[in-house]
Structure formats: C-alpha cells, structure tokens
Image (cartoon, helix red, strand yellow):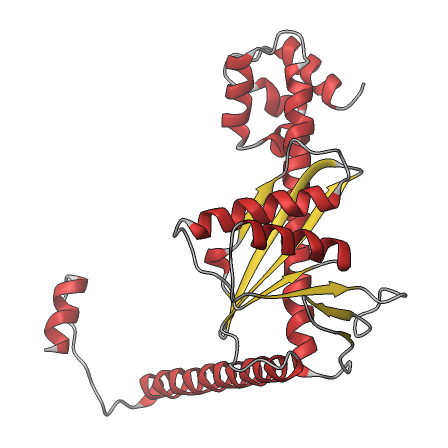
Amino acid sequence: MLEEALTNQSGHKVMISDNVRSHRKRWVDLAVTNAEQSLGSHMASRNNLQQRFQSLQEALSLEEMPGRLECFDISHTSGEATVASCVVFDQNGPLKSDYRRFNIDGITPGDDYAAMSQALKRRYTRIKKGEGLLPDILFIDGGKGQLSEAEKILEELQIEGVTLVGIAKGPERKAGLETLIVSGGPEFNMAPDNPGLHLIQHIRDESHRFAITAHRNRRGKKRTESVLEGIDGVGPKRRRALLRHFGGSAQVASAGLEELAKVEGISRILAEHIYATLHNQ
C-alpha cells in the first residue's frame, strides 16, 4: 500500500527495500544516525524547557505550571517611529506565529508609559473579543511604572487570571541582576543560574530583539518615504513604481544610480536627481 501511494504521488514506480547493501546501506545508516541525533537534541531541548517552566512556577509560587507566556517591550529612537513588541512562548519555546508588533501613534514622543498602555490595550481588547488566548504570565520589560500601566489596562478591560511580572534591570544592567516585580506581590531576585530566570531572560531578550527589528524597519521606511515625497518630479505613481521595483523603501535608499534609471517612468536625469537627494549630494 505504501509503495502504491508513493508511486501515485511521484508519478513513477517506487519500490521499498528493507535489506539494502553497499552504498544504499550507508545512506540508510546515515539517515538513521541523523534521525537519532535530531530526536536526542529535540528531547534535550524539551526537557530543558520543562525544567525552566517548573523553576518559574516555583519562583512565582504558582499552583499550576504556566503554559503560555507573553512579554512586551518598547523601541524607538528619541521618540521616532515607536514600536511595541509582543512575543509569546509556550512549553515548546517561542511561538512565533503568535508574535505581534504595534506601531504606536498619537502619543508624546518618547513617552514609554503611554506607548506600553496603547500596545496592551490594543492587544487585550482583541483577545477580549476572542481573537487570541490570554497568557498565564504577562511579563513587562520595565519597572514599577510600566507594570502600573499594565495593571490599569487589565483592570479597565476586566481581565483576570493573568500573573503580571515586571522585569527591572539591575543597577549595572547586567544579565542575572534583574529584579522581578510581581503585581500585588513581592519584589525579588533569582539566582543567576536559576533555570526559571534563564527562561525570563530568553523571552525578555526575544521581545527586545523583535521590537528593535520592527522599529528599525518602520524608521527606515518612514524616512525613505518622506524623502521620496519631497523629491521634485516624484509623484505618487513614480513612488509606487520605485517601491514596487525594489521591493521596499530600504532597497530604494540603497539602490545605485544605474538601478534607479532602470525603473519604468524614471529617466536618467530624474534618477540622478533621486540618487543625489537620497544621498544628500
């Protein structure tokens, strides 16, 4: 039956042999070795994660082991192109399909509290409507002020059953010196070699990476698009042609003169003007 199914799928005759020799036996041995190593690595990683989740449960005195964690972070450059990140972990590690980023607008530039409040409200309003799952633990990359904003939003949305934890950096901002602030509970430090702390550091660092990446992309796009809008002779149609041709604003900014001149509707003279403007020449 398996031979028939593989034959139909591949479009040619497939035969299965279970007693191969010579170089085909070496292929089978190599496949088995790779499978065993891959499975061993997967199980070791899974066991390590289970240990980290158990340590986290003990550190926070939770009745049950948490299954879903979320962490928020804010990134901007002097208030420009503010972005909030939300990363999600479950007991298998990062759940990247559930990651979210929020472009923050309508706040005073550089106001991280307002940015955090806006991101949390948008995130949990959607979840309240059934567009996602609530986490067991919500980590906030920040101290008491950021944690207070999270408390206000969850209270406003009447969301219960979520353990709120702020991750305050130590005085020297070194890994292992973080202070954990539990909403309605104590402030404490965990031993630098505690597996639970390693899990917290992992999700914190991942939220930081995701926020910075999103911020840089937004900042680059915003800066390039604003420059394109201010170039004489480059209207909406030519702007779209440039972005479509290169695939994005960052690629337009890094394009050479000859490449710009190849875009439909962009003459050589206009290409020179665009290049000079983008490179401040």
Q: Position of residue 21 (x, y in %)?
A: 29, 90
Query: Considering the image in quadrants, where does the N terminus appear?
Result: bottom left
Q: How many marks?
A: 0
Q: Position of residue 180 (x, y in %)?
A: 74, 70
Q: Position of residue 233 (x, y in %)?
A: 62, 7
Q: Is residue 277 above or below residue 194?
A: above
- Left or right: 29 in relation to 160: left
Q: Nearer the viewer, residue 194 or 116?
A: 116
Q: Position of residue 218 (x, y in %)?
A: 64, 37
Query: Considering the image in quadrants, where does the C terminus appear?
Result: top right
Q: Is residue 2 above or below residue 131?
A: below
The residue at 37%/82% (across/down) is: 27
The residue at 66%/47% (across/down) is: 116
Q: Is residue 49 above or below residue 142?
A: below
The residue at 49%/81% (across/down) is: 42
- Using the rendered image of the protein, determine whether residue 13 is visible from the camera's viewpoint: no
Q: Is residue 2 above or below residue 95?
A: below
- Left or right: 25 in relation to 239: left
Image quadrant in which you'd find residue 48: bottom right
Q: Nearer the viewer, residue 218 or 75?
A: 75
Q: Nearer the viewer, residue 151 or 171?
A: 151
The residue at 56%/49% (across/down) is: 156
- Using the rendered image of the protein, determine whether residue 183 is visible from the camera's viewpoint: yes
Image quadrant in which you'd find residue 137: bottom right
